[in-house]
Amino acid sequence: MNDSLVNMVFSFLCSLVTLVLYTSVIKSHMVHEWGWGWLRGNHSRLSQYEEKYSYFPETERIKRLGDAKNMFQFAYDNYVKYAFPLDELDPIHCTGRGSDQSDPSNLNINDVLGDYSLTMIDTLDTLAIIGNTSEFKQAVQLVIENVSFDNNSTVQVFESTIRVIGGLLSAHLLITDASQPFGDLEPEGYENELLEMAYELGTRLLPAFDSTSTGLPHPRVNLQHGVPEDGIKQTCTAGAGSLLLEFGLLGQLMHDPVFEGVAQTAVKSLLASRSNKTGLLGNVIDISSGKWVGTQSGLGAGSDSFYEYLLKAFIMFGNSSYLDSFNELYSSLKKYMRRGRQNCRSGLGDVPMYVNTHMDTGKTINTWIDSLQVAFAGVQVLAGDIEEAVCTHALFYAIWKKYNALPERFNWASKQPDVLFYPLRPELIESTYFLYQATQHPYYLHVGSHILESIETYCKSKCGYATLHNVITKTKEDRMESFFLSETCKYLYLLFDKDNHVNTAFHRYIFNTEGHLFPLRSEYRTKTWWNPCKDDRSCASVNFASNMSHQCVNMAPEKHFPLPLNSHYMEQIDKLVGLI
Ligand code: DMJ
């Protein structure tokens, strides 16, 4: 990896700095203020939060690592046994399911299930990461031998891209990494079949970009027939604007500039449609007119990965205009969507929170937050804004503590869920993992441990892990989405596996929004068909740190606490969600 790339991923250095900072601060607090009294049983000066979260035993970490592995293995084995080659496992009835051909309007299913062994493809790199090399090789063979994209399935372009193209590319890159850091992953006679499959699927998705003057893609494509005649012409922001990583990588690996080109055009089109009053985007846009039909500006469903991919595309490809756009948007988000006290970890005022606003006014338009929103804490860690990430995460963990799950939507005004289901989503554990990587604070191991325990207790079913239909009654639904294996289990495992190659070489990888591991390589930043110097932005060798508005957080000493967030702030959040 060249020097500029090392510079670029400055946030990982931030993580290191923060790690040292936290470790020394925790030690000095304990030694000087309490004289290690907590070890001698003098608990009087420690709040219950501090007492609970300041330490995580090594034996417990090892146990949790085993638990996470067992969770993955149980669900994966049963998917292979009962569902493969179908897309998903029904974990209660122990059967498989594919697309719903009888009801094309069943988008909840058909958007993601394309009759292409979705769960298997989505799971490949998790097998590698947990060290199951033999099963990885076998799974790759099964995918090569069984999966076809020549199906009469109408899928969502975004879902197909992040889950299937993302999964195939990740597995291909792990197989072809000459240093084989996860062990020998190369199936006998491997001839880039996964890459070719990704290219074939990408090519089948390309009609989504035809005949739209805005450059915004149709949200759905039939894999055999292209854009459906009667197709919906409205797309969410995340759907249209989060294809950069996979399309960019695919184009690079196949030497085909079309892919990054269309993904980039869609992003530019969205950015050009920002409100000229606030700089914010809405959540649904008409691909023909380029007019917003959903004017809610938020961080959750429909918008989430758009912000994420601007930052990650910069880290991956080095185009500084992605970073500039991310920074501009982040400033607007903070200005118009953020409520509460100015600093997460100091000062007086309400709990910091990002609310849903109208894109033109910045006025609050409803009082719910959704579970996908917590992924933004991981983005904030990558952006080096760790202090802010701590608060984004803490709010959602308080909701988890209340229900032992995350309701799809939680109303912070009524302190009740507005939408009650929990489909085994990964976002909370994902941001827990990122914050642990950045801070190494045992608090985040406790959080992960609690999440693992809750899923084991309330979601485990006869053949896998089931969606919670209702987080209050804990009734289940017979569905295990593919992201449970590709993300939820992966991040849980990585949280507890401190020696995993991903963690020891954290600065050399990036995760796509489906949790697929992509290596960062200098050659991805030197493509020949696109020259950043011709862009309107400067192409001078990008120094990540100097371009960021949220440099490594240099916290004032009075802001250093033995907890990521001082206990009275934690208590304030628990009260806000109605936990205490
Ligand atoms: C996943 O497919 C991805 O994480 C995506 O970015 C959002 N939705 C699901 C998980 O909740």
Image: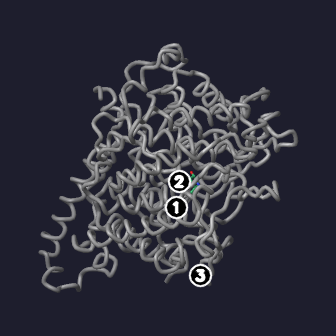
Q: Position of residue 573 (x, y in %)?
A: 48, 72
Residue contact at pointers 2 and 3, CB within 8 angstroms:
no
Are there few (<14), some (14-19), or many (20+) residues within 10 Å of tag 2? Answer: many
Decide if residue 414 is on the left or right side of residue 58. right
**Which numbered marker is on residue 120?**
2
Residue assigned mark 1: 80
Q: Position of residue 296 (x, y in %)?
A: 71, 51
Tag 1: amino acid:
Val
Tell me the CA gap for discs 2 and 1.
8 Å
**Residue nearest the viewer, comparing 106 with 209:** 106
Q: Tell me what residue is drawn at x 53 percent, y 31 percent.
A: 250
| Residue at disc 1, CB closer than 8 Å to ligand 1 | no
Instruction: Give the image quarter of residue 344.
Output: bottom left
Tell me the CA gap for discs 1 and 3.
27 Å
Tag 2: amino acid:
Met
Residue contact at pointers 2 and 1, CB within 8 angstroms:
yes
Instruction: Give the image quarter of residue 290.
Output: top right
- Tell which quarter ligand 1 is in: bottom right
Which residue is the extreme one toward the right? 230
Q: Is residue 92 visible?
A: yes
**Residue nearest the viewer, comparing 25 with 310:** 310
Q: Position of residue 306 (x, y in %)?
A: 59, 43
Label tally: 3
350 shown above or below 500: below
Q: Tell me what residue is drawn at x 57 percent, y 45 percent.
A: 164
Question: Nearer the N terminus, badge 2 or badge 3?
Answer: 2
**For numbered disc 1, what is the local secondary structure?**
helix
Residue assigned mark 3: 474
**Residue nearest the viewer, comparing 184 with 203:** 184
Closer to the observer: label 2 or label 3? 2
